[in-house]
């Protein structure tokens, strides 16, 4: 017999129990969430049922969950096992607290964690992404979703990349920012040597005309590969391109066409992880 949910109804937007979810649209509030003020990590908010389920599976400490009545019914079995407050509110209250319409009806607050040392993230990895100055939260979220879906082992970020635990990044990633190991590389770009010293080939994605077509790239299953990607517009910096072992491009059919960095990342991740037909035939002979 399933244990009933001990949900607490919240009808007053000023209720202190929903303080973690207050004014989430405000950039100043988001920045305050990133640190506890005493040098310790702060907290973050995940939005949507997919992100909540990955948060539950991650084992991270959940502070509370705030849902509307419809989602409470659908997530009942999962939330019944949660050792944290489950708060339920109607849509007008949710919007008054968060500062925007919470269409997905699910918000969860959880503690951040100290980021691991890059060597720990790279230790058992074979395929990783290294991102330079990706500053769009939705692009970052999609890159994490592709990394998790296509089997990358880790994502490493330059110091100026935006926050993967920002609500929109978590949502767009479908919660993969909670399951794909990640950390930051500093100082930048000198810390890229950490990746090379761990035995990775550095493959930089660039639209440069003299770069190799991605279709000709065929990394072996035993090769350790780091895919380097830069921000929309500027792309990878000259220093990072100079540090790369090879430069790869996705040829466009028209000179006026280009791909969003998140779309390019998905193609590059597939190329890095797919088992080619030639390799399969060799192993079955």
Image (cartoon, rainbow, N blue to C red):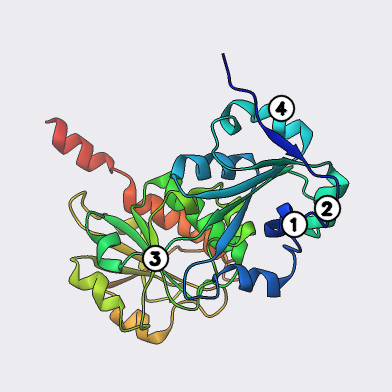
Q: Is residue 7 above or below residue 95?
A: above
Residue that lies at the very extreme toward the top in this rendered image: 1
Crowd rating for badge 3 (residues with CA inside 10 Å; few <14, some 14–19, many 20+): few
| SS type, badge 4 | helix
Residue sitting nearer the eye, 277 or 50: 50
Q: How many marks?
A: 4
Crowd rating for badge 2 (residues with CA inside 10 Å; few <14, some 14–19, many 20+): some
User: Label 4 vs label 3: CA separation?
Assistant: 35 Å
Residue at figure coordinates x 68%, y 28% from the top left: 74
User: Which quarter of the rendered picture does the N terminus lie within?
Assistant: top right
Find residue 232 and name its label. Answer: none
Residue beneath label 1, please?
16
User: Label 4 vs label 2: CA separation?
Assistant: 20 Å
Using the rendered image of the protein, determine whether residue 28 is visible from the camera's viewpoint: yes
| SS type, badge 1 | helix
Left or right of 178 in this view: 102? right
User: Label 3 vs label 1: CA separation?
Assistant: 29 Å
Q: Is residue 13 above or below residue 51?
A: below
Residue beneath label 2, please?
95
């Amino acid at each position: 017999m399933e244990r009933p949910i001990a949900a607490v109804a919240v009808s007053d937007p000023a209720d202190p129990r929903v303080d973690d979810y207050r004014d989430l649209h405000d950039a100043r509030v988001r920045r305050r969430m990133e640190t506890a003020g005493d040098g310790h990590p702060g907290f973050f908010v995940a939005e949507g049922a997919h992100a909540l389920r990955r948060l539950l599976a991650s084992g991270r400490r959940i502070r509370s969950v705030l849902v509307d009545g419809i989602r409470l019914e659908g997530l009942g079995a999962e939330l019944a096992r949660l050792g944290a407050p489950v708060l339920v509110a109607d849509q007008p209250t949710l919007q008054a607290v968060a500062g925007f319409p919470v269409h997905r009806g699910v918000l969860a607050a959880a503690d951040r964690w100290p980021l691991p040392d890059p060597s720990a993230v790279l230790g058992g990895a074979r395929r990783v992404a290294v991102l330079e100055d990706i500053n769009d939260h939705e692009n970052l979220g999609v890159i994490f979703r592709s990394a998790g879906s296509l089997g990358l082992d880790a994502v490493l970020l330059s110091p100026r990349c935006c926050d993967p635990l920002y609500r929109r990044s978590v949502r767009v990633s479908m919660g993969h920012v909670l399951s794909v190991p990640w950390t930051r590389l500093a100082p930048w770009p000198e810390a890229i040597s950490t990746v090379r010293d761990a035995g990775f080939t550095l493959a930089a994605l660039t639209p440069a005309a003299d770069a190799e077509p991605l279709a000709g790239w065929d990394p072996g299953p035993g090769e350790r590969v780091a895919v380097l990607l830069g921000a929309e517009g500027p792309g990878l910096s000259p220093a990072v391109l100079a540090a790369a072992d090879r430069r790869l491009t996705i040829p466009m059919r028209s000179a006026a066409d280009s791909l969003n960095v998140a779309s390019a990342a998905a193609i590059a991740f597939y190329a890095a992880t797919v088992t080619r037909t030639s390799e399969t035939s060799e192993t079955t002979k």
